[in-house]
Image: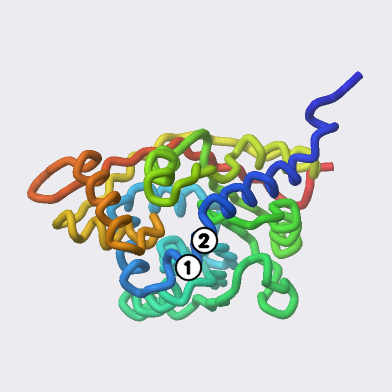
Amino acid sequence: MIDPLNDTDWNEIWKSRTRGNRESSPGRDCARIWESRESALRFWDMCRQERSRIDKTVWETDITKESRVLDIGAGPGTLAIPFAQKAAHVTAVEPAEGMCSVMREKMAEFSVSNINIVQKRWEDVDVESDLQPPYDVVIASFSLGMPDIRAAIEKMTQASSKYVYLYHFAGPTSWDRQWQELWPRLHGRAYQPGPKCDVLYNVLYQMGIYPHIRTFRLEHNQRYSTLDEAVSALAPQAQAETEEQKAVLRDYLKGAMREEGGALVMPGSSIRVKMWWEGGPNR
């Protein structure tokens, strides 16, 4: 009898969809999008508007004042800093210079000194030489852009002495739909979204990891003072470099944004999934 789950290499499906996403938008990866300090600050401000989501993530993570935390894809420290305020130590892995720069600024602003920043992609990190394992908690929150997700998770379990938490997306996000509409007009080709949590779960299952799962919807509206600000902020993500491309983006934003409280708002929403487990693979 054919077993579709076990006869399918889900890690290869992850690789294929990640490759398709990158080939449809070459050069558009998270480290490059958030390389500048300005874009990193904008990301920090956007996350601060989702403070309840950040607080909930911290509250729902099993840490104590003695805990050691590894935050993978830490961005500007939106989770690393509140974790550091509750735990003994945080190691933040983040490749983008802009994100690391803002994280250092925010560490000083919030008087946090127990974060060690490792400026590398997770796939380039060596657990023994770059990190300080073991960690009570390893978390990757919406930062699973690794091309080989099985190898990435194996490295997470290697670094963890207790818990691993993964956050990812379920189904198409509002920005997936946005880029699918815009990409042919901007670049003359289709946009392919990256892999979602269905593939991730099946990779874990084939690894012998059977995680707890919680699904939730998140509204995340982006606010801009002017249309010019919105175009400037989104142009790097859209890879809109020429004046013609920026004009296409401007026309799209005119129709997509709404006025609210003296600002222009780009509405967004996504269904998100939290997966977590304790210890190594549950074999």
Give SS at disc 2: loop
Q: Amino acid at mark 1?
A: Arg
Q: Residues within 10 Å of mark 2 (few under 14, many from 20)?
A: few
Q: In the rendered view, tell whether residue 185 sits above or below residue 242.
A: above
Left-right relation of 111 to 260:
right
Left-right relation of 217 to 51:
right
- In percent of width and height, residue 200 lies at 66, 42
Residue at point 61%, 59% (across, down): 137
- Evaluate if marks 1 and 2 touch, with contact meaning CB atoms under 8 Å apart: yes
Q: Is residue 90 visible?
A: no
Residue located farthest toward the left when viewing the structure as drawn: 262
Task: List the residue tagged with mark 1.
Answer: 32
- In percent of width and height, residue 219 lies at 33, 40
Q: Which mark is residue 29?
A: 2
- In percent of width and height, residue 21 lies at 57, 49
Q: Amino acid at mark 2?
A: Asp
The N terminus sits in image quarter: top right
- In percent of width and height, residue 272 lies at 48, 39
Left-right relation of 93 to 59:
right
Q: In the rendered view, tell whether residue 165 sits above or below residue 69.
A: above
Location of residue 45 (image quadrant): bottom left
Give SS at disc 1: helix
Location of residue 7 (image quadrant): top right
